[in-house]
Amino acid sequence: MTTAQPLVDLRDITVSFGAVKALRGVSFDLRPGEVHALLGQNGAGKSTLIKVLSGVNQRDGGTVLVHGKETNFKSAQDSRDSGIAMVYQDLSLVPSMSVASNLFLGREPHGGTKLVRNRSIVHAAQKYLTEQGFPIKASARVGALPFAYRQLTEIAKALMGDIRILVLDEPTSALSAGEEEILFKTVADVTKRGVGVIYVTHRLHEVFRISDRVSVLRDGLNVGTHNTSDITMEKLVSEIVGPGHERMAQATLSVEEGDRRSAFRNESSESSTHAPVIELRGVKNARLNGVDLKVRPGEILGLAGMVGSGRTEILETMFGLRRADEGEVLFEGKPVRWGSPNKAIAAGVALVPEDRHEQGLVLADTIAANIAMPRLPQLTRAGAFTKGEANRRAKKAVSDLNVRAPGIHTKLQNLSGGNQQKVVFGKWLTPEPKLLLLDEPSVGVDVGARDEIYGIIRGFARNGCAVVVVSSELVELTLLCDTLAVIHDGRVTTCVHTSEVEGEERLHHLVQEPAR
Amino acid sequence: MSTATTPAPAAAAESRRNVARDLFSSDRPYGVLLALIALVVFFSIKSDVFFTSANLQNIGRQTTLVTIMAVGMTFVIIAAEIDLSVASILKLSCVSAALFMNDFSNNWFLGAMVGIAVGAFIGLVNGLLTTKLGIPSFLVTLGMLGVAKGIAFVITDTAPVLVDSRPFWAVFYEGSIAGIPVPILWTIVALIIGGVLLHFSTFGRKVYATGGNATAARYSGINTDRTKILCFVFTGVLAGLASLIFTAQGHAARPDFADGLELDVIAAVILGGTSLFGGRGSIIGTLIGSLIIGVLNNGLVLIGVSSSWQIAVKGFIIILAVALSKRS
Ligand SMILES: Nc1ncnc2c1ncn2[C@@H]1O[C@H](COP(=O)(O)OP(=O)(O)OP(=O)(O)O)[C@@H](O)[C@H]1O
Ligand SMILES: [Mg+2]
């Protein structure tokens, strides 16, 4: 071996789940002080590979060397003890406990007694968070935090203690540029200390920003490992999707390169003459301070803003999850006071929520059952559930969205993260909604599927559906939307046509420093 | 249609598999089925009378109350709630029906309706308190266990209330159709209604979704409160039905019987593979679980285990069976 001994050396790892071969002989290594990006389509085996390293998944074959010694972790605790810190794709915090308690979970500092001192924990946690630059209150209850802050808490938790290997599985999927920076800075800090970082992501620009090497998995095989400086975005994309499928990833390339090619824009401009599908007039409630918004048929409206600005709450108000205490909500011109989503859904509203595990899916249920869930009233004949029709819809969604699963009766808990996200989207495909609300619709979705999802959103809009998109990726908004509303502190500060925004920089500015 | 090209036999096999999957809701209670078979074989070897048709009918009759209430309990537990008050509902329902028949009209049908209505009402109260006030159902129904039992004692002075109605006895216990005793027929009716509701109706889908992830269900437009309330009401109705069978059996409503029966009911449901955390379970599983409870209650007596030991052995076997089903 020429360079320093690798921190992690995985050789010919194979893993299967029943008939599904998740990994078919993957080799991967991590050197001290480097960031090694791990890429691949949804279901390629990225999460499985790192779960083999952490001991959550058991391998069928191959060897795992950590610090040069062959190891056989049986649980996450074992790997933690060898200095491996993990941030899993799907959060593993206890929502009912405070940030501080979560940070210290399993390693509570205690005095001579075994009693945990709550006050000292909060104090120590706050000190640590402030030092590392995380904008989180240690005493806050995790369940009450915005999703992105929960993700930051998870990262903060992994970084605590004496770590030597840091594994991040799509840690930034809900973070916007500002919060992303906090992570990049901490990653740079730890690598200086010689910590090796494995970084799983679908956001390719991050790869070029922070990684030293990059490996690509496809269908459970390692199809290439490169120095990041030796490879271009196009080559990377074609390696991820496989030869001959590059076309699929046009939208991703555009997003990654910050390029708004007109071919991907929604060109319907006659929409402005129609009456709005939904209109908010001076809506105020716990989180909104007077929101005025209109969305017309065929229009795609983007909501830009910082975490906690009230974007999600606007969608929730439109979906009947929150009431307007003041002001009114008009749907197709008529004032409505939906107290619950079932009324909104019956009227033709659909919501893809930001937290797929909490709000989007029943993980123990099948793909077909999840897709049927919001459409039960239509799938009922004389009280009986019409299974045939439900299965037909599920099959269509699975093929339209290219969900990788053995079949429509696969349970959601056995799908990879990105494929779960596609199912959340697939719940609303049939019949087409009149108003589609999307909260971070492409979280964790791979380069090919992003195009498919964008295509479907535009198709809906062409058929007269009004769409509202919340995204932490500004380029995604400029690429997808006709109009943009910048949200700050529960109100709309600016409304612009996408065509009037010159470059992402300017939009960035609008979001960070809202005009009054 | 693409299925038009599929050869007919394959399609038929596929649909048969689908029905099987629906019934077991893809969680196969094979482990407990093996446990049931093992128990039956064991008792058949140890006792000559165990595997006779007379004794098997006995088991069926003795298991009736547990099975019928377990069908309702399956819904409640899949919806991620619990009902500890079923035995008390049974007490209050049966004394209400009996008092009504003594004091107002000896019409068996009206009496039966009163018993069932009382059960439904208590279920409704359980459901409303759980969902609208947000009190955990464990506490609500623990309280109701005392309240309903107490009222049953008060209105009867803790004395049995005789029921003197031949048609009532016949319909709920003593009659038989085609040689099958009515209590077993009532059990089958409850199982079929429960099975169809849970596995083939839209309501069943809502129950699974509510228990699997209530937030996601609400975000998908399912009225989770109403779903839970209906589960409690259904359990109440079935406890009411069980109370009628119980009354017809002894020709009297007895408020001092059936203490602790809720534990057998819950054990039957959990043995059948229904998850205490909600979202998973099946009616066939519950039937198997109930039969295990019934076979144990019957077989341990037949092989002469003392009644004190019966309690301990039953508890031990329940734990063992659940452990077995977890492994497979
Ligand atoms: N517990 C499980 N049971 C059955 N199959 C599983 C299980 N976990 C993962 N799989 C399958 O293994 C394959 C690899 O999954 P994995 O989660 O590693 O993908 P991934 O590369 O992380 O994808 P994503 O980008 O969507 O997160 C997928 O086909 C998935 O369906
Ligand atoms: Mg993954």
Image: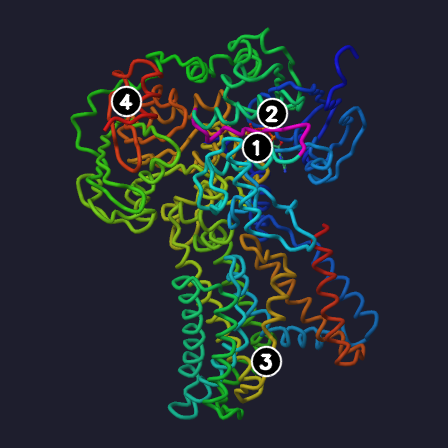
Residue at the extreme top of the image, as rendered: A230
CA separation in Å, label 3 and label 2: 57 Å
Do marks 1 and 4 share a subunit?
Answer: yes
Task: Please provide the residue range marked out in magenta.
Answer: A162-177
Q: Is mark 2 within 8 Å of ligand 1?
A: yes
Q: Quadrant of ligand 1?
A: top right
State the mark number for residue B258.
3
Report helix, strand or loop for mark 1.
Answer: loop
Do marks 2 and 1 share a subunit?
Answer: yes
Do the CB atoms of the residues marked 3 and 2 lie less than 8 Å apart? no
Left or right: B169 as drawn, with respect to A378: right
How crowded is the residue under tag 4: few (<14 C-alpha within 10 Å), some, or many (20+)?
Answer: many
Residue A218, position as x, y percentages in the image: 61, 20
Determine the main secondary structure of the stretch shown in magenta: loop
User: Which residue carries the number 1 mark?
Assistant: A416
User: Which residue carries the number 2 mark?
Assistant: A44
Q: Is residue A167 magenta?
A: yes
Do marks 3 and 4 share a subunit?
Answer: no
The amino acid beneath tag 1 is Ser
User: Which residue carries the number 4 mark?
Assistant: A482
State the mark number for residue A469.
none
Residue that appears at 41% across and 78% down: B113
Residue A312, position as x, y percentages in the image: 36, 38
The amino acid beneath tag 2 is Ala
Judging from the image, mark 3 belongs to the subunit labelled B
How crowded is the residue under tag 3: few (<14 C-alpha within 10 Å), some, or many (20+)?
Answer: some
Residue that appears at 60% across and 20% down: A37
The amino acid beneath tag 3 is Ala
